[in-house]
Image (tube, helix red, strand yellow):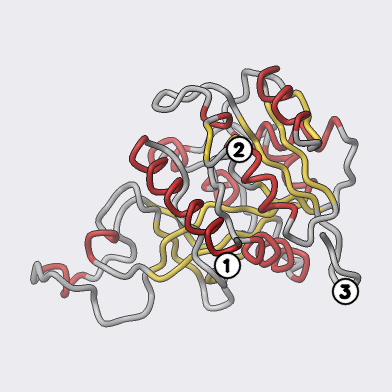
Amino acid sequence: MMSASTAPFTVVIPARFSSSRLPGKPLIDICGKPMIQHVYERACESQATRVIIATDDERIINAVEKFDAEACMTLAGHPSGTDRLQEVTRLYEMGDNEVIVNVQGDEPLIPAKVIDQVANNLIKTETAGAATLSEPVRNRADLFNPNVVKVVTDREGFALYFSRAPVPWARDEFAENGSSLPAVDIYRRHIGIYAYRVSLLNQYVQWEQSPVESVESLEQLRLLWNGHRIHVADAMETPPHGVDTEADLKVIRGLVENRLADIS
């Protein structure tokens, strides 16, 4: 948990039971523990002063109680994890200046240093209401993959735009239809971990969905549309992929097994 030299922040882990591809995903067993417990334990390795699991299902509440974690029952009808996050801050009567880190409930191997990094980046950047992370795009396939979200920033590290498209568009290089990336260090993949100030979350839930958000299916664009700044930095460590499919689950189980073997 938090060191004396670090400003306080809270981690909230949204964990819905429903999932179209993996029903009951937070409770899927990974090496003897439910997935949500792995995520919780990684968050507890961070400098957070508090870690709260936010769910809409009693089955998850019951599972969380077994490993003595703090859980919060939230409404079932939230359109996004960000809305669920805001409900937690309201129920706990958190102040406008408090910092909340949203850690996805399907990332059982998220590094604690990444949680600390995004929180501390926001704490140090008073002109931003949110912060997130990125990493270099390393190949052309990822750049053109719509499931790999790209982010473009200004020279101070504030987001200009997020997109599923390959942005910025390298007109001349792409016209040649080559197999490599343009020789410029500008392409970044967005890593989906966020830190927010509570004041911004309170505004977020009052805004309508923005046109660009609707087109791209990227809720962070609602912040930019409404004139708020998002700080972006390259991650100190790249988190392993989360669990969206059975194939992802197999990979994560193997990585956890290796981790446990290294510890023992």
Separation of residues labelled 2 and 3 (CA atoms):
33 Å
Mark earlier in primary sequence (2, 3): 3
The kind of secondary structure element at disc 2 is strand
Amino acid at dot 1: Phe
Locate residue 224 relative to residue 258 in the image: left or right. right
Disc ID at residue 219? none
x, y percentage for residue 81? 61, 35
Separation of residues labelled 3 and 1 (CA atoms):
25 Å
Locate residue 115 relative to residue 190 in the image: left or right. right
Mark earlier in primary sequence (1, 2): 2
Q: Nearer the viewer, residue 137 or 254?
A: 254
Query: Residue tagged by mark 3?
Result: 5
Q: Nearer the viewer, residue 8 or 214?
A: 8
x, y percentage for residue 50? 83, 48
Separation of residues labelled 1 and 2 (CA atoms):
38 Å
Disc ID at residue 33? 2
Q: Are marks 1 and 2 in contact (CB under 8 Å)?
A: no
Mark earlier in primary sequence (3, 1): 3
Q: Nearer the viewer, residue 212 or 17?
A: 17
Locate residue 262 relative to residue 49 in the image: left or right. left
Disc ID at residue 158? 1
Residue 6 occupies quadrant:
bottom right
Q: Nearer the viewer, mark 2 or mark 3?
A: 2
Amino acid at dot 2: Lys
x, y percentage for residue 44? 75, 53
Q: Nearer the viewer, mark 3 or mark 1?
A: 3
Q: Residue at x 53, y 42 (%)?
A: 31
Q: Quadrant of the N terminus?
A: bottom right
